[in-house]
Image (spheres, rainbow, N blue to C red):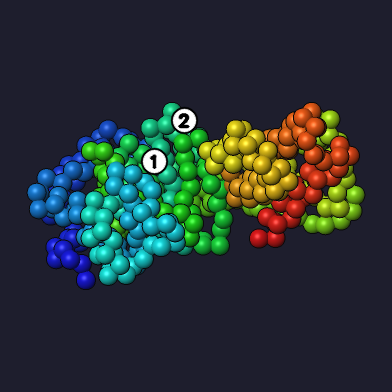
Amino acid sequence: MPRNEKRRPTRKSGAAATVANRGLREQENAHHDDTSSIGHFAPVTPTDPEQLDIETDVELAAHTLAESGGLVLPIIADGKTPLIRSGFHAATTDHGMISAWWRRWPDANLAVAVPSGVLVIDIDLDKPMAAQTITDLESRYGPLPATRTVRTPKGGLHYYYAVDPAIRFRGIAGPGVDLRAGGRHYVLVPPSRIGTARYEYLDSDEWTPAAELPLSWIAGLEHRRPVLHTTRHRVLPAALSGIGDVSLETVTVDDLGDFLDALPPGKMDRLMARAVEPTALAVSMRKAAHDTLTRVSYRVVALAAEGHPGGRVAVRDVIAAFVREMERRMSAGEPARDPDDIGSEIVRAVAGAVIRVSAE
C-alpha cells in the first residue's frame, strides 16, 4: 500500500471544475476548429491548495497508476533517464517496489511504460519544425481526435491513442514528432518536473481512455519491414558501389538491393548518427576493423528496419570508414586485407546484417 494515505480524487473539485469549464469556454471562443491538435487543449491550473498538493505528489501518482495497471518507473530528478539500469523493462505495478524506489529516490520523476495497444504521439513544439510537421500530417491524414493528452514542461504534447498491438510503427513521424509504441518505449507523466515546469494533463487525466487512432493515420504511420528472399547472382545497389577504389562483388541474396532501397530515406536521426559518429567509428576501425564493420553494419540496418531514417547513408559511412582504415594500414605498412578481398568482406558484412535483421 502507498505510504502516503492521501487519495487522488476521481473528479475535479468544484473550484477546479469551474476553472476547467471557464478555460474550455475561452478556448472554444478562441479556436473555431476544435479538432485541430495544435492548441486543442487549454491548460487548467488547479487553484485548490489541497488538490494541488495531491496532484504534485509523485509517489502517490505512481501508486495510482499502478492500481490501474500502469507499469511505472522512477526517472532521474529533473531529467528523463531511468534510475533502473534495465530501463522500462523494470517498470512494475508492485506497490512494495514502488515505495522502495521512492524511499531511495524521493525526488525522482515518474515514467510509465507505454502499454501494448497504445501509441503515444510525442510533439516537441519547442523544436522549429514540429508545428509544421503536425500541420502537414493533419492535412494529409485528417485532424487528430481529442484524447488523453499531456503537456510537457517545454510546451510539447503527448497524445495517447489506441491501436492494434500487432501494428508496427515508425520511430518518427517527421521532424519534431516522435512515435512511442507500446511494449518498446516509456514516457514521463504528471507530475514529473523539468526545472520549474511540470508535466500536466490537459482536459484529461490518467483515467481518460485513449481514443482510437484514425485508420488514415495508422496507414500513414505504419512501418512495414522490408522482406528478404534468397536467390543467386544479385548485386548490391549502385548507391553502395564506387566507394574509393572498391568494386562490390555479386552476392547470393535476392532483393538485397531492394531491401536497402526500401529503408526509410532522409537525414540521419540522432540514434543513426550516433552509430556512425566519425571519430568513434575511426577509432573502433583502427582497433578491430572487421568486427567494427560487422557490428556497426548490423546496428545501422537494424535501426533503419525499425523506421529510423538515414540507413542508406549510414551504411555507406560504415563502408567508407572500413575502406579508409584499410588504405591507412597499407600506407603505413601494417597488416591489411588484400585489395581483392576488401569488396568481398564488405558484401559479407552488409548482407549478413540484412539477413540477421530480416530474420528477427
Q: Residues within 10 Å of mark 2 (few under 14, many from 20)?
A: some
Work out whether residue 121 or residue 102 is closer to the camera in this orientation and state it: 102
Mark 2: secondary structure: loop
Q: Residue under label 2, please give it.
A: 129
Q: Which mark is residue 187?
A: none
**Lateral position of residue 297 relative to residue 166, left or right:** right
Q: Residue at x 73, y 37 (%)?
A: 322
Work out whether residue 255 or residue 165 is closer to the camera in this orientation and state it: 255
Mark 1: secondary structure: loop
**Lateral position of residue 317 relative to residue 163, left or right:** right
Q: Is residue 340 above or below residue 216?
A: above
The three-letter code of the residue at mark 1 reads: Ser
Q: Residue at x 82, y 41 (%)?
A: 337
Measured as percent of width and height from the top left, residue 197 is found at 25, 39
* Distance of label 1 from label 2 (alpha carbons): 15 Å
Q: Residue under label 1, please give it.
A: 37
Quadrant holding the C terminus: bottom right
Q: Residues within 10 Å of mark 1 (few under 14, many from 20)?
A: many
**Lateral position of residue 358 relative to residue 24, left or right:** right
